[in-house]
Image (cartoon, rainbow, N blue to C red):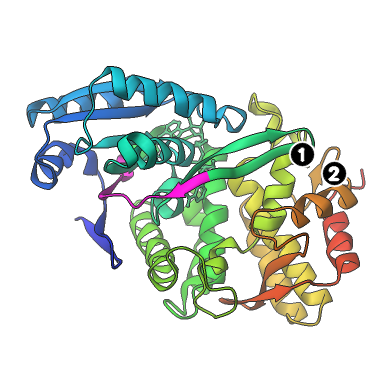
Amino acid sequence: MTRTARISLPTATYDIAIAPRALDEIGERLAYLFKSRRAFVVVDGNLPDALVENVLTRLDEAGFDAATSAIEAVETRKTIEVVSRLLHECALAGLDRGDPIIALGGGLTGDVAGFVAATYKRGCPIVQCPTSLLAMVDASVGGKTGVNLALPDGLRKNLVGSFHQPSLVLADLDALASLPDRQFRSGLGECLKHALISDAVDRDLWDWTASHMEHLLGRDANLLPQLIERGVNVKAHFVQSDEREQDTNSASSRMMLNLGHTFAHALEAIEGLTPADDLALREPAPRLLHGEAVAYGLLAAARAAHALGRLAESDARAIEAGVTSLGLPAHVQGPLDPARALSLMKHDKKAQGSRLRLVLPVALGRCEIVEAPDAGIVRDTIASIVSRD
Ligand SMILES: NC(=O)c1ccc[n+]([C@@H]2O[C@H](COP(=O)([O-])OP(=O)(O)OC[C@H]3O[C@@H](n4cnc5c(N)ncnc54)[C@H](O)[C@@H]3O)[C@@H](O)[C@H]2O)c1
């Protein structure tokens, strides 16, 4: 059964189709959506060959002449140089403005390919085919695209980018089969975030997610489609209320989707941070994954909200339990200097001038935007998530 969510904006309406083997339909769906029969596929280099070949075969069967280019899904390579290479390849392939670019991969591939589509010939269509849980539930929906910049004080996440809504999102649940467990758990970090801002859309989402976490971690095939659809509906609510994140104070501001992210982006900027056990040693990159950083960001946001008198202790504990139920230790280890992290947070692209602006939970499911919170409290909160070992 295909579950379909929909984003309706003044400038764009598109479906998010969630189903096992959803990618089998890519050829016929694109042939219906576009007059063009040429496409450019940006492929995450870690995907199994069979998955990529299936997509190319389906496109070919539907009459598409598709060029492909692989990219390396590593945050330090999510750069303007990769965008430049892909733009040159689009031009050399003779891509026209009406030809779709297809992003086949995790959130990083979607952000890069989306930015290429936003800028090539001043904008051509992008079709998002997310293959990670994080990308299915979050990154592929809502139109944010972009790349990181490496500055002397650390990696600045998504500092360059554009809003460019997809024409279609195809979330193929079978694509998750090859996703490593650590990446899957990272995606559950964003699912917890959605649950913590879900009150206006889906009041039961926090309790449901927290109570099913064990089965979700086991990738229960009955629960996963529901988790993704409900998460996408939460995201759709905020994207539809405030597409370009211009609302800085109401409960339906798109900024709510940034819960935990100001902390997370600072943690991601610092090289060498890992969850405080041997999880990271099994992966080549000595860096927190995005969803892991978000999960620690949720923990920090809950502690800061409690210390600022905005969140009950029992709710702060429930958020902490939610994060540790992902199998993440409650601490990070590595060179985390709280003062440096605070300084990075003050320069986050969401900050105004160097004034800190945070989204903080006030209940399980509800958040508020807090301007210029007490910096000492925020710094102490960051210190509380560093391992003392
Ligand atoms: N645009 C947005 O709204 C938005 C929202 C959230 C996150 N993001 C961005 O998304 C990125 C995080 O997304 P992500 O967690 O998917 O990371 P990712 O794209 O880096 O993928 C994580 C890892 O999983 C691999 N992978 C992906 N799908 C796979 C599969 N099916 N089988 C095997 N390996 C697979 C990738 O090659 C990579 O090694 C970050 O760059 C973040 O900034 C964007």
Residue pushed farthest top?
92
Q: Is residue 40 above or below residue 170?
A: above
Question: Is residue 173 highlighted in magenta?
Answer: yes
Residue that carries the numbered disc 2 in the rendered image: 336
Determine the secondary structure under disc 2.
loop
Does residue 194 show up?
yes
State the residue at coordinates (38%, 26%): 87
Specify the segment rendered in magenta: 161-174
Side of 237 relative to 268 (left or right): left
Residue closer to the observer: 155 or 141: 155
Amino acid at circle 1: Ile
Side of 154 relative to 18 (left or right): right
Whether tag 1 and tag 2 are in contact, CB under 8 A, the answer is yes
* Percent position of residue 217, x then y: 51, 50
The response on whether ligand 1 sits within 8 Å of label 1 is no
The response on whether ligand 1 sits within 8 Å of label 2 is no
The first of marks 1 and 2 along the sequence is 1
Amino acid at circle 2: Leu
Q: Quadrant of the N terminus?
A: bottom left
Side of 140 relative to 332 (left or right): left
Side of 39 relative to 163 (left or right): left
Residue that carries the numbered disc 1 in the rendered image: 270
